[in-house]
């Protein structure tokens, strides 16, 4: 396993974690919201056993990647720069939770270079889901009113409206008891969060994710709660019922 920074856009750094097995079967992993490159560590042993190379990274503002304004398309372009730097031609993508839309964006923009697409618990475009608008809070709707013209103001509104939650996240960032894990997944995935290895990975990843503060969470919201127009579609691989299938 190795960790290193890669320069994108000339002067910005993206932090990479590169681990696993065979050079010819890579997977690019997109972490959740919040999350970091360290989140993929839960699968290290599986990757080694199966001979799979896993490349994970911190989105801008998370972990050790330089902060900047983002949308779905800009993160996809970052990853294109990353795989080009690593001389990786074709690869699979996998996104968990908030990483799902970014994995979709990478598949949509890089066409046949993406061989497979996997998503676990990823959100759909909020305004296109039946009943999606009604499920949004008043603050979410106010933030969305600034898009697409003023994404910085939308990010500020997401931060302001969720200040109590974001402050709570920061207050338990270094808490080894990790109460936030039970807040978020105690009911939906009790067996997963009770697993000692998985829980430890989440604790470490969460602490790293918020190293620079919670602002990156707001920008994730801008990217995937707002319109998805920043994605230019080429010919993405098919994904059926959450199961990745090979491009034909």
Image (cartoon, rainbow, N blue to C red):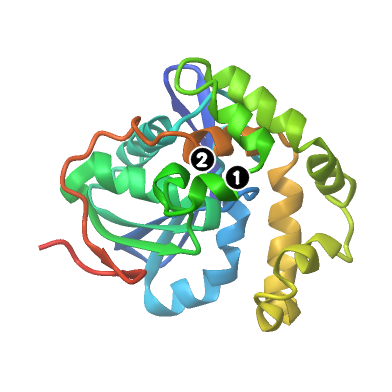
Foreground tag (1 vs 2): 1
Percent of width and height locating residue 21: 40, 67
Q: Which residue is mark 2?
A: 225
**Quadrant housing residue 80:** top left
Which residue is painted at 16% across and 61% down in the image? 247
Q: Is residue 173 above or below residue 8?
A: below
Q: Mark 1 falls on what kind of element?
A: loop
Which residue is situated farthest in the left direction here? 248
- Res. 13 visible in picture: yes
Total marks in image: 2
Which residue is painted at 81% across and 48% down in the image? 169
Percent of width and height locating residue 26: 34, 59
- Res. 64 visible in picture: no
Q: Are marks 1 and 2 in contact (CB under 8 Å)?
A: yes
Q: Is residue 213 left or right of residue 168?
A: left
Q: Which residue is mark 1?
A: 136
* Mark 1 nearby-residue class (10 Å; few <14, some 14–19, many ≥20): some
Q: Is residue 206 left or right of residue 114?
A: right
């Amino acid at each position: 396993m190795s960790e290193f920074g890669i320069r994108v856009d000339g002067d910005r750094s993206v932090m990479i974690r590169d681990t696993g097995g065979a050079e010819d079967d890579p997977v690019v992993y997109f972490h959740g919201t919040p999350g970091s490159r360290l989140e993929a560590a839960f699968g290290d042993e599986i990757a080694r056993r199966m001979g799979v190379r896993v490349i994970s990274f911190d989105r801008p503002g998370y972990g050790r990647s330089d902060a900047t304004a983002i949308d779905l398309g800009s993160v996809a372009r970052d990853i294109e720069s990353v795989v080009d730097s690593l001389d990786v031609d074709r690869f699979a993508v996998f996104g968990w939770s908030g990483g799902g839309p970014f994995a979709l964006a990478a598949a949509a923009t890089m066409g046949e270079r993406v061989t497979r697409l996997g998503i676990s618990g990823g959100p759909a475009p909020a305004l296109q889901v039946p009943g999606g608008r009604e499920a949004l809070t008043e603050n979410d709707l106010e933030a969305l009113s600034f898009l697409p013209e003023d994404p910085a103001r939308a990010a500020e509104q997401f931060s302001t409206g969720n200040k109590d939650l974001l402050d709570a996240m920061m207050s338990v960032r270094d808490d080894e008891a990790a109460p936030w894990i039970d807040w978020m997944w105690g009911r939906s995935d009790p067996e997963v969060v009770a697993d000692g290895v998985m829980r430890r990975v989440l604790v470490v990843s969460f602490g790293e994710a918020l190293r620079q503060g919670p602002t990156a969470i707001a920008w994730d919201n801008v990217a995937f709660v707002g319109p998805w127009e920043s994605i230019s579609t080429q010919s993405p691989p098919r994904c059926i019922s959450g199961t990745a299938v090979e491009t034909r």
